[in-house]
Amino acid sequence: MRIKYVYFSAVFLLVFIPFLYPLVVEGRLKEKDYQFEWCLKKKGIVEYRLQDRSRVDCLLDDYAIEFDFAKSTKVMEGLGQALYYGMKTGKKPGLIIIIERVKDIKHYNKVREIIKHYKLNVHLSFVSKNQKVLEKMKSIIVGKY
């Protein structure tokens, strides 16, 4: 009897999780949400299209800004994109890392270390809606790049 219950529960979860997942994740903000809000506050151009059809997340008077979530490969990709967009637009490159959880701060620190080590002229910043992240970042941030 117990085996049937476990089997039924497993099948139920496998069948219904794909339908429930969007409901759980729907409340989570997307990169575009952060990008749009930040860029409009700075009076920048959202999704500025380059000649090669790639898009700068936010183009300001002095900066070409890339936004990426604080995930291990995303932040490294974002750093490369920021440098590329800066080169193509003739503006300073900028990377804004979206930090949703305290444990993801380590990815911000990795990029910060790379920028410092190679003396890259990249403006690095972050955005977060998580109060714990904001409090933790206050103690980490010493200066701007």
Image: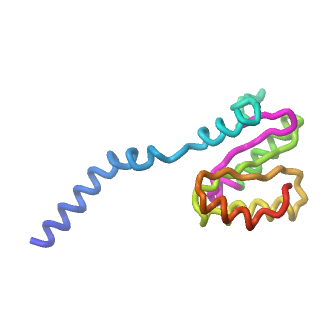
Q: Is residue 91 magenta?
A: no
The reply, left or right, for residue 51 in relation to residue 68 is right
Residue at image position (76%, 31%) is 43
Q: Position of residue 103 (x, y in %)?
A: 60, 66
Q: Position of residue 70 (x, y in %)?
A: 64, 56
Residue at image position (32%, 45%) is 19
Q: Position of residue 116 (x, y in %)?
A: 86, 62
* Front residue of 54 and 90: 90
The reply, left or right, for residue 1 in relation to residue 103 is left
- Magenta segment range? 58-75
Identify whether 96 is placed above or below 48: below
Q: Quadrant of the C terminus?
A: bottom right
Q: Is residue 71 magenta?
A: yes
Query: Quarter-wise, where is residue 132 in the image?
Result: bottom right
Of all residues, the one furthest to the left in this rendering is 1
Query: Quarter-wise, where is residue 1 in the image?
Result: bottom left
